[in-house]
């Protein structure tokens, strides 16, 4: 698939803006987190996306922050940059959902929520207005955010994604690691991520006030 230069530049600019915003919220502690935006046409077996390079300080902006990869997570252009160590999880989410953007951050509240509800395998959230950010409008709606194990071997995690994605829930947690949130584009993925973070904080604080789960 040939990617137009202007599409690549637009994707890198979009990622750069989101990266700076999330860094200002301290959402990339210790070089954690990764961001991607799909570029060009999509078919489940043919797509390209721009993703953050691995191991960078994501609060700093440099000309070497992003690269383009294919559906297998391999660079599509000659580069010395390494794609995110978690690129295969992005590949699988794109393949399964056709999303336009995927944002992954480590926060204290998304880690605590995964720890608190790990035995259930999902974080239950019910009757909170911000569930509407996922375009779920029914009264007193309940969502379950899947929690996947945090294996050191990323392909082992990636192969679990297909069986765990909830059709109405644009996100998955990795246990004591972080959240992957996605959407049709950067705007939507950001809205979803912000809603998840609000809901995790709400759920963790509520559990604390109630003295348990
Ligand atoms: C230092 S955090 C461990 C790796 C990780 O979970 C992460 O999100 C960042 O990895 P990347 O290769 O994308 O920089
Ligand atoms: Zn991570």
Image (tube, rainbow, N blue to C red):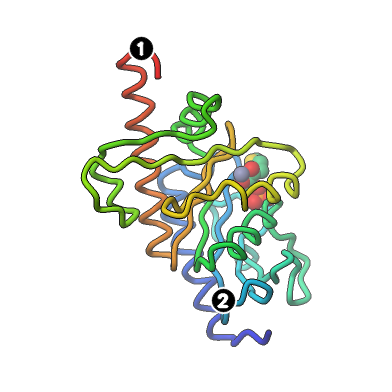
Residue found 73% across the figure and 75% down from its top: 76
Residue found 59% across the figure and 58% down from its top: 93
Residue for badge 2: 39
Q: Provide residue 126's location: percent of width, then percent of height.
A: 31, 36
Residue 12, compared with residue 36, is above or below; it is: below
* Quarter residue 174 falls in: top right
Give the residue furthest to the top.
211
Labels 1 and 2: the sequence-earlier one:
2
| The residue at label 2 has a CB less than 8 Å from ligand 1 | no
Residue 17, compared with residue 151, is above or below; it is: below
Alpha carbons under labels 1 and 2: distance apart: 46 Å
Residue found 61% across the figure and 60% down from its top: 52
SS of the residue at dot 2?
strand
Q: Provide residue 213's location: percent of width, then percent of height.
A: 40, 19
Whether residue 56 is visible here, answered yes or no, is no
Q: Foreground residue, 139 or 70?
A: 139
Whether residue 16 is visible here, answered yes or no, is yes
Q: Provide residue 142's location: percent of width, then percent of height.
A: 33, 40
Residue found 27% across the figure and 46% down from its top: 130
Residue for badge 1: 211
SS of the residue at dot 1?
loop
Q: Provide residue 28's location: percent of width, then percent of height.
A: 53, 45
Mark 1 closeness class: few <14, some 14–19, many ≥20 residues within 10 Å:
few
Q: Foreground residue, 40 or 121?
A: 121
Residue 171, compared with residue 91, is above or below; it is: above
> Seen in the image, is 134 located left or right of residue 67?
left
């Amino acid at each position: 698939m040939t990617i137009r230069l202007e599409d690549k530049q637009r994707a890198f600019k979009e990622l750069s803006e989101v990266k700076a915003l999330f860094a200002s919220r301290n959402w990339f502690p210790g070089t954690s987190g990764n961001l991607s935006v799909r570029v060009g046409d999509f078919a489940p077996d043919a797509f390209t996306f721009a993703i953050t390079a691995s191991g960078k300080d994501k609060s700093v902006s440099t000309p070497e922050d992003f690269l383009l990869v294919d559906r297998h997570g391999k660079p599509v252009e000659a580069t010395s940059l390494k794609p995110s160590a978690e690129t295969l999880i992005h590949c699988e989410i794109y393949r399964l959902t056709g999303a336009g953007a995927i944002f992954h951050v480590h926060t204290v509240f998304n880690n605590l929520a995964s720890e608190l509800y790990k035995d259930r395998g999902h974080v239950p959230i019910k009757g909170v207005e911000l569930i509407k950010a996922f375009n779920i409008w029914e009264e007193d709606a309940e969502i379950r955010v899947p929690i996947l194990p945090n294996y050191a071997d990323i392909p082992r995690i990636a192969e679990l994604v297909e069986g765990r994605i909830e059709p109405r829930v644009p996100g998955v947690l990795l246990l004591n690691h972080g959240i992957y949130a996605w959407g049709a584009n950067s705007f939507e993925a950001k809205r979803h991520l912000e809603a998840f973070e609000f809901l995790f904080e709400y759920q963790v604080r509520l559990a604390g006030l109630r003295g348990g789960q």
